[in-house]
């Protein structure tokens, strides 16, 4: 039996594993939890070691990670610069393509209420000690794949409470769902929202054993502003920020997203966001290298403005040029607001691509 000391405590009493054994295994290249559990001989149902081993792993990564160089900037076409302000505001107003967008918002609300009434849900799980950083979790069977959904609303509207409408459809397919809340503008900046979403994903992965999902099958999904936030989480993982790595996420489903924020600076959308051209550029995933990102599914509705369609197509082409497995397509008879319903429909083009990502 190992002898515990102050400098070398026992990490797992079930299997008599001390800190030195964990650190040695990490130094030998077993640099994620699944590899560590296998090489240390820890059973899958042992819960004593999960958190302390992950703490050691994170500390090792932090100490040995080379200073991150500035991400490579790239060009994102700017046809919007030649538009009048009125035209630009129309192009970045999704409601301009529908008769009454509130019909869809009311559907979000009613279907989300029905999901909460119908399913068991672990509500308001705190993914940090910060106020408002909460998520809801709908479990399918043990070791199920997980979809992490980040809602839209132009970074200033909606919440997780109106965004769990896809839970019945996903759990019926054996897919667990987490719906993330983040602080809206003007109370938070978009940079703060990105950090919150990253913390949510990191926390979920750390809690995989207790929540019961498969860390090898984790897909992040988002609609509109949520698509932007998902793409930003991928960028953070690429740069090993917030405890994420490129291996943390299996894939992403990005619906009607905005990947270049610069067109928003001079229109009404920016009033609560307070973006400048510099900060908008810094927060635009389409302006950076995408090498090493996981597979992405990018989709938009046929009934959307040309700028939303263009942003998706441009971002898709950049992913392809960086060697990322990306699919991009238009969904017939869908608009900016109702395309999200296809996420839980296994017979839709989006649902089929989600199944492909998870299998």
Image: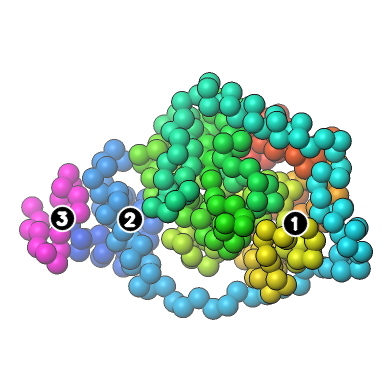
Relative placement, left or right, of 316 versus 357 is: right
Q: Position of residue 326 (x, y in %)?
A: 69, 53
- From the viewer's side, name the closer residue of 4 and 243: 243
Check residue 8 for magenta coloring. Answer: yes
Q: CA distance from mark 2 to mark 1?
A: 40 Å
Q: Secondary structure at mark 1?
A: helix
**Principal SS element in the magenta part?**
loop
Q: Secondary structure at mark 3?
A: strand
- Which mark is first along the chain, 3 or 1? 3
Where does the magenta region start and end? 1-17
Q: CA distance from mark 2 to mark 3?
A: 14 Å
Dot 1 surroundings within 10 Å: few (below 14), some, or many (20 or more)? some
- Which mark is first along the chain, 3 or 2? 3
Q: Would you place residue 162 above or below residue 258 in this image?
A: above
The residue furthest top is: 118
Which residue is painted at 74% across and 48% down in the image?
256
Q: How many marks?
A: 3
Q: CA distance from mark 1 to mark 3?
A: 54 Å
- Which mark is first along the chain, 1 or 2? 2
Q: Position of residue 122 (x, y in %)?
A: 43, 33
Q: Would you place residue 21 above or below residue 122 in this image?
A: below
Q: Which mark is residue 269?
A: 1
Q: What residue is disc 2 on?
A: 54
- From the viewer's side, name the closer residue of 172 and 202: 202
Q: Which mark is residue 10?
A: 3
Q: Secondary structure at mark 2?
A: helix
Relative placement, left or right, of 26 versus 81 is: left
- Location of the C terminus by quadrant is top right
């Amino acid at each position: 039996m190992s002898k515990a000391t102050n400098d070398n405590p026992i990490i797992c009493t079930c299997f008599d594993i001390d800190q030195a054994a964990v650190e040695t295994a990490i130094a030998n290249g077993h640099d994620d939890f699944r590899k560590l559990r296998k090489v240390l001989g820890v059973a899958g149902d042992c819960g004593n070691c999960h958190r302390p081993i992950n703490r050691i792993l994170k500390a090792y990564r932090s100490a040995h990670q080379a200073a991150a160089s500035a991400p490579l900037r790239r060009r994102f076409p700017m046809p919007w610069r030649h538009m009048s302000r009125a035209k630009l505001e129309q192009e970045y107003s999704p409601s301009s393509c529908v008769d009454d967008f509130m019909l869809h918002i009311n559907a979000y609300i009613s279907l989300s209420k029905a999901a909460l009434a119908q399913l068991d849900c672990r509500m308001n799980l705190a993914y940090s000690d910060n106020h408002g950083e909460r998520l809801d979790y709908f479990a399918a069977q043990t070791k199920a794949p997980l979809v992490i959904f980040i809602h839209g609303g132009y970074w200033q509207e909606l919440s997780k409470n109106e965004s769990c409408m896809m839970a019945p459809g996903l759990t019926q397919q054996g897919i667990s769902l987490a719906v993330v809340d983040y602080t809206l503008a003007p109370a938070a900046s978009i940079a703060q929202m990105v950090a919150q979403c990253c913390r949510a994903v990191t926390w979920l992965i750390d809690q995989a054993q207790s929540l019961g999902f498969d860390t090898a099958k984790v897909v992040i999904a988002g609609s509109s502003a949520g698509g932007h936030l998902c793409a930003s989480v991928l960028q953070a993982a690429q740069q090993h920020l917030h405890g994420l790595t490129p291996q943390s996420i299996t894939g992403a489903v990005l619906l009607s997203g905005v990947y270049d924020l610069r067109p928003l600076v001079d229109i009404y959308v920016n009033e609560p966001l307070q973006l400048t051209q510099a900060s908008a550029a810094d927060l635009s995933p389409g302006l950076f290298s995408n090498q090493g990102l996981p597979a992405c599914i990018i989709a938009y509705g046929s009934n959307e403005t040309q700028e939303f369609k263009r942003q998706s197509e441009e971002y898709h082409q950049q992913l392809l040029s960086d060697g990322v497995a990306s699919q991009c397509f238009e969904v017939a008879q869908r608009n900016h607001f109702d395309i999200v319903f296809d996420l839980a429909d296994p017979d839709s083009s989006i649902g089929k691509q989600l199944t492909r990502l998870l299998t």
